[in-house]
């Protein structure tokens, strides 16, 4: 039995990640072209880690450099911040601490790279990752005491149109300036 977290650097491993996103709440089925584009974005603009058990990926976290277009993160420049744009665990392995281990590993690793903060967005209601993020030291982003939200409408790969409200969470990392 071999459990470990490692950087995803080859396409064959990334193809396994798609299995993690097939189940709700994601219900995504990526085309080969979409998978390749996503994989290349992590290689060129970020990093991704897999939680492996005997060479199978049970969980995934993907991080991109910079503030993403339209996101209300104004305290940091794009060079100072990272965005967690995906975190998921296979349905049968949820609630076993895998998402927390991926989150904590990522924070430890990116601290080395000297970023000032990391953020994510998650569902405003029924979030699966909110408590994991809170336990890792993230805070819910607010303005004038109100949670900052974003309405999101998107098309799932099965053609269904989905809509929800997302909130932003941020964690400041160690201040590395000398």
Image (tube, rainbow, N blue to C red):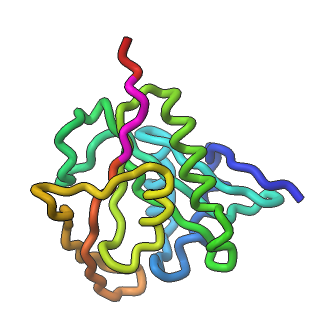
Foreground pick, 86 / 165:
165
Would you say residue 176 sits in the magenta stretch?
no
Instruction: Identify which residue is drawn at 85% across, 55% down.
Output: 2
Horizontal arrangement in the rendering, residue 78 relative to residue 106 (left or right): left
Magenta residues: mostly which secondary structure? loop
Q: Residue furthest left?
A: 144
Foreground pick, 153 / 168:
168
The relative height of residue 114 versus residue 24 in the rendered view (above or below) is above
Location of the N terminus by quadrant is bottom right
User: Over which residues does the magenta segment extend?
Assistant: 171-175
Q: Quadrant of residue 117?
A: top left
Horizontal arrangement in the rendering, residue 57 relative to residue 62 (left or right): right
Instruction: Identify which residue is drawn at 63% across, 43% down.
Output: 7
Instruction: Identify which residue is drawn at 26% across, 35% down.
Output: 78
The relative height of residue 34 versus residue 83 in the rendered view (above or below) is below
The relative height of residue 35 versus residue 126 in the rendered view (above or below) is above
Percent across and percent down for residue 121 are 33, 60
Percent across and percent down for residue 19 are 61, 72
Would you say residue 172 sits in the magenta stretch?
yes
Q: Residue furthest top?
A: 178
Foreground pick, 85 / 103:
103
Q: Residue furthest right?
A: 1
The relative height of residue 43 versus residue 169 in the rendered view (above or below) is above
Percent across and percent down for residue 56 are 75, 62
Instruction: Identify which residue is drawn at 59% across, 49% down.
Output: 49
Percent across and percent down for residue 87 are 50, 61
Q: Residue furthest front?
A: 145
């Amino acid at each position: 039995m071999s459990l470990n977290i490692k950087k995803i650097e080859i396409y064959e491993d990334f193809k396994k990640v798609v299995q993690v996103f097939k189940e709700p709440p994601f219900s995504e089925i990526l085309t080969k072209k979409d998978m390749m584009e996503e994989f290349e974005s992590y290689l060129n603009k970020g990093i991704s880690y897999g939680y492996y058990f005997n060479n199978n990926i049970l969980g995934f976290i993907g991080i991109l450099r910079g503030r993403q277009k339209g996101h209300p993160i104004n305290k940091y420049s794009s060079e100072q911040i990272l965005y967690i744009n995906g975190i998921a665990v296979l349905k049968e392995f949820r609630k076993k601490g895998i998402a927390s281990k991926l989150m904590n590993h990522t924070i430890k690793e990116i601290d080395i790279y000297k970023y000032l903060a990391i953020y994510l967005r998650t569902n405003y209601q029924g979030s699966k990752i909110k408590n994991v993020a809170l336990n890792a030291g993230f805070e819910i982003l607010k303005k004038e005491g109100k949670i900052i939200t974003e309405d999101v409408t998107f098309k799932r790969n099965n053609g269904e149109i989905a809509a929800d409200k997302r909130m932003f969470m941020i964690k400041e990392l160690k201040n590395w300036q000398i």
